[in-house]
Amino acid sequence: MLKFYKYATRSSMTALWFYVCVFLPLVFEKCNTAERGSKCITPNQEVASCTPITTCHIIRDAITTRNQSAIEFAQKSQCGHDTEPLVCCGTSAYSAEPYYFSYFTKAPATPPPKKLIPGLSSVSTNTLPDRTICGIERESQRLIGATVAAIDEFPWMVLIRYNNDQGEDVGFKCGATLINNRYVLTAAHCILTSPEPISPVSVRLGEWKISTDTDCVYNIAISTCSDSVVDVKIDQQTPHPYFSSSNGNNDIGLLRLEKDVLYTDFIRPICLPAVDVPPPPIGTLMTVSGWGATEEGNQADIKSKIEIPLISNSDCEKTVSKYTRITPNQVCAGGVEGKDACKGDSGGPLMRTYVDDTSQWYQEGVVSRGRGCGKKGFPGVYTRVARYVNWILNVIAEG
């Protein structure tokens, strides 16, 4: 078996080409010419780059183990050859498998046919992405303590655009998160907007600075530019059927997009927690991100972020909700002066990474309600996502 090292010699690269094209004929059925560095789409629906297999460490290392799944994935990843095989090099060497199968009873021996959306591929439209795809950001430097998100930070963030009852655009009013390539998670009150005569019509993905189309960040060492934003019409709106506008219980909803979206460095889904997993310990620092109102009262132009501590529901009730209780379907966070979700952040995520895996983000809550913005001693209320994962999966499965 061939072994590969950080610095491959030309002979070892040639050996790998020979190994792939001759000894693994199932990997590449044919070697068409293709342009090195051109954009391509992986079998997991990621936008990636067509690169030599010797420089795509993920696929290269996987196929040298002779794992059949890796070989089949490499075959599907072929994008041609130059002086050696080229593959569409994404973030995984294996086909994405949904990570929530254990939440359900065993599937019948002969599953019913999938409901297909006319004219679109059925890939991943009725599942959640696995943990090789969700909750992962592009590796780049982050400023500790910064309140402005990096240009490629939190690529699952979504803006919801609204029209009034005359069909006129009234701008972005709520946030949301991408949870697979067809569905967006938000708050029910962002869908059921009565008595205000507005309704959600589309979503924007890949945004950082609202006032510009293609965003760029420049510094002395390097400049980073995002892809153009992606605006997609909303195909279906599903607020939770038992949403209560009086106490905010069940404040969660889903928006199905008119078409699938492709994953890039700037558009990627967030992970959802397991069903009914307990909330994090009180005091855990959580992250909120969005384009909500600033201290001056205007909508933020650039994606922002804050860290706020989780508060016990009993302490939260004493300040936020004197007449209605905080239910087990909700969590509270914040109460720190100047740090809070605010108008325009509704529907966005309360999220965190885990101690043993700081590179993967999970959505613990959905921004629901609060008293004012950033008032000391007044935490915000969030819908607990873990309590609704089965409902989310059922909505997606029904399509």
Image: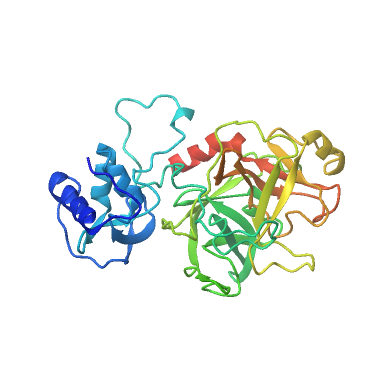
Residue at horizontal 39%, vertical 55%?
46
Task: Between residue 77 and residue 82, name the one nearer to us.
Answer: 82
Residue at horizontal 60%, vertical 31%?
277
Question: Residue 35, image x and y in percent?
Answer: 26, 68
Question: Residue 246, image x and y in percent?
Answer: 76, 44
Say how many tags the image has: 0
Is 44 left or right of 247, judged from the image as shown?
left
**Does residue 105 sit above or below 256 in this rendering?**
above
Quadrant (top left/top right/bottom left/bottom right) for the N terminus: top left
Answer yes or no: is residue 216 visible.
Answer: no
Residue at horizontal 35%, vertical 52%?
6
Task: Between residue 92 and residue 187, name the one nearer to us.
Answer: 92
The residue lying furthest to the left in this view is 22
Is 27 left or right of 205, judged from the image as shown?
left
Residue at horizontal 26%, vertical 48%?
74
Is 376 left or right of 110, judged from the image as shown?
right
Which image quadrant for residue 319?
A: top right
Task: Between residue 173 and residue 61, name the one nearer to us.
Answer: 61
Is 5 left or right of 102, judged from the image as shown?
left
Question: Residue 4, image x and y in percent?
Answer: 29, 48
Answer yes or no: is residue 54 visible.
Answer: yes
Task: Between residue 21 and residue 371, name the one nearer to us.
Answer: 21
Question: Residue 105, image x and y in percent?
Answer: 44, 24
Quadrant (top left/top right/bottom left/bottom right) for the C terminus: top left
